[in-house]
């Protein structure tokens, strides 16, 4: 049953990612990209990482994709029939995609995971003592509580990355509004 669920989620993810790359309507591409990001959160749920699944939905589907759709809707002439959708670098893109796919398959083939093992069990077997022990009631809530302070420690430098990304997204939003304005002043 769990293998079937994985194949269903992976099929939806692969199909929506393929459609996000091949559909000619840019708005529909963004919607298929959102569906692909939902598929990634489904994979996180399958692997037992509920926190990462929630973060995936909130940040990527809820914020980044909505910002992209907002930018598409505000940009003039992007949905025009005269606008060129495909570029001239299709051969180079296919070659790069095949190279990356080959590298990923080689890396997965040489990984220490056994064919039938669950990845989280294999990771805890690889590095004993590194996995966080669950709370006494059996919930994994203690992992999420300890994640926040670990990410925001000054010596790790992740707080700067969070602030940098927020400024980048804000500048993209302001830029799309400036591009979409009708009057030249």
Image (tube, rainbow, N blue to C red):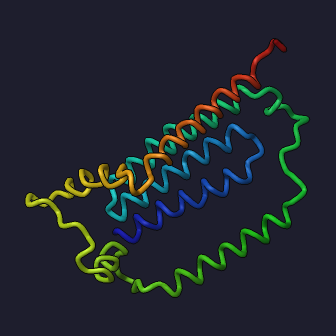
**In the depicted structure, whether residue 44 falls above or below residue 121:** above
Point out the image quarter for the C terminus. top right
In percent of width and height, residue 108 lies at: 52, 80
Quarter occupied by residue 101: bottom right
The residue shown at (51%, 42%) is: 61
Left or right: 16 as drawn, with respect to 112: right
Left or right: 14 as drawn, with respect to 148: right
Give the residue at the far left of this rendering. Answer: 136
Quarter occupied by residue 168: top right
**In the depicted structure, whether residue 151 falls above or below residue 62:** below
**In the depicted structure, whether residue 184 falls above or below residue 152:** above
The residue shown at (75%, 22%) is: 180
The residue shown at (59%, 80%) is: 105
In the image shown, does 51 or 142 lie closer to the viewer?
142
The residue shown at (44%, 45%) is: 57
Quarter occupied by residue 184: top right
In the image shown, does 45 or 141 lie closer to the viewer?
141
In percent of width and height, residue 123 lies at: 34, 77
Left or right: 179 as drawn, with respect to 43: right
In the image shown, does 26 or 169 lie closer to the viewer?
169
């Amino acid at each position: 049953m769990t293998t079937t669920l994985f194949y269903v989620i992976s099929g939806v993810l692969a199909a929506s990612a393929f459609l996000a790359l091949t559909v000619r309507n840019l708005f529909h591409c963004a919607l298929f990209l959102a569906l692909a990001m939902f598929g990634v959160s489904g994979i996180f749920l399958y692997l037992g990482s509920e926190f990462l699944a929630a973060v995936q939905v909130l940040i990527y589907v809820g914020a980044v994709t909505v910002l992209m759709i907002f930018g598409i809707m505000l940009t003039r002439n992007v949905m025009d029939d005269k606008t060129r959708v495909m570029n001239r670098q299709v051969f180079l893109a296919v070659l790069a995609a095949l190279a990356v796919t080959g590298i990923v398959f080689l890396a997965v083939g040489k990984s220490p995971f056994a064919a039938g093992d669950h990845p989280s069990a294999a990771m805890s077997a690889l590095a004993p003592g590194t996995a966080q022990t669950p709370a006494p009631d059996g919930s994994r809530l203690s992992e999420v509580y300890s994640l926040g302070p670990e990410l925001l420690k000054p010596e790790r430098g992740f707080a700067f990355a969070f602030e940098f990304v927020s400024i980048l997204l804000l500048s993209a939003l302001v830029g799309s509004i400036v591009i979409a304005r009708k009057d030249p002043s």
